[in-house]
């Protein structure tokens, strides 16, 4: 199966370890030296009405990706996912 990075955007990401839906892929991190995909970026949950004060992004390493389907990406993130987050830039 072949797919473009643009095809990965907006696919739902589900953690197979606990069955939680993490969200949709927003961005892909690529290693510039080798050109390999390093991680998927999934925006974290918003805190107020889903509009203001966005949460942290989930950074999911490429080796945690188990299966890529037509509309779903299965990942295996075990334990506390706090260590795979990064702070988002503020709106203003």
Image (cartoon, helix red, strand yellow):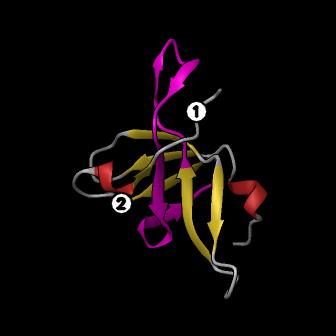
- Element under label 1? loop
Location of residue 88 with respect to 40 vertically, above or below: above
Q: Judge whether residue 59 is colored magenta.
A: yes
Coordinates of residue 84 in the picture (x, y in percent): 38, 56
46 on left or right of 80: right
Q: Residue at x 46, y 49 (%)?
A: 58
Can you name the residue that lies furthest to the top here? 49
Q: Which of the 4 quarters of the picture holds residue 10?
A: top right
Can you name the residue that lies furthest to the left here? 79
Coordinates of residue 66 in the picture (x, y in percent): 45, 66
Q: Of marks 2 and 1, which one's residue comes earlier in the chain?
A: 2
Can you name the residue that lies furthest to the front here? 92
Nearest to viewer (mark 2 / mark 1): 1
Q: Residue at x 28, y 53 (%)?
A: 17
Q: Which residue in the structure is indicated by mark 1?
A: 90
Mark 2 and mark 1: Cα distance apart in space: 29 Å
Q: Which of the 4 quarters of the picture holds residue 33?
A: bottom right
Name the quadrant of the N terminus.
bottom right
Q: Residue at x 47, y 37 (%)?
A: 44
Camera-side residue: 75 or 46?
46
Q: Residue at x 56, y 53 (%)?
A: 41
Coordinates of residue 20 in the picture (x, y in percent): 35, 40
Q: Judge whether residue 49 is colored magenta.
A: yes
Magenta stretch bounds: 42-71
Location of residue 53 with respect to 5 vertically, above or below: above
Q: Which residue in the structure is indicated by mark 2?
A: 76
Q: How many tags in the picture?
A: 2
Location of residue 5 with respect to 24 vertically, above or below: below
68 on left or right of 35: left
């Amino acid at each position: 199966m072949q797919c473009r990075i643009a095809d990965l955007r907006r696919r739902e990401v589900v953690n197979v370890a606990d069955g939680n839906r993490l969200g949709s892929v927003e961005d892909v991190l690529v290693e510039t030296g080798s050109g390999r995909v390093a991680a998927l970026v999934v925006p974290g949950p918003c805190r107020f009405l889903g509009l203001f004060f966005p949460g942290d992004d989930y950074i999911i390493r490429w080796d945690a990706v188990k299966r890529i389907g037509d509309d779903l990406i299965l990942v295996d993130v075990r334990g506390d996912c706090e260590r795979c987050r990064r702070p988002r830039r503020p709106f203003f």
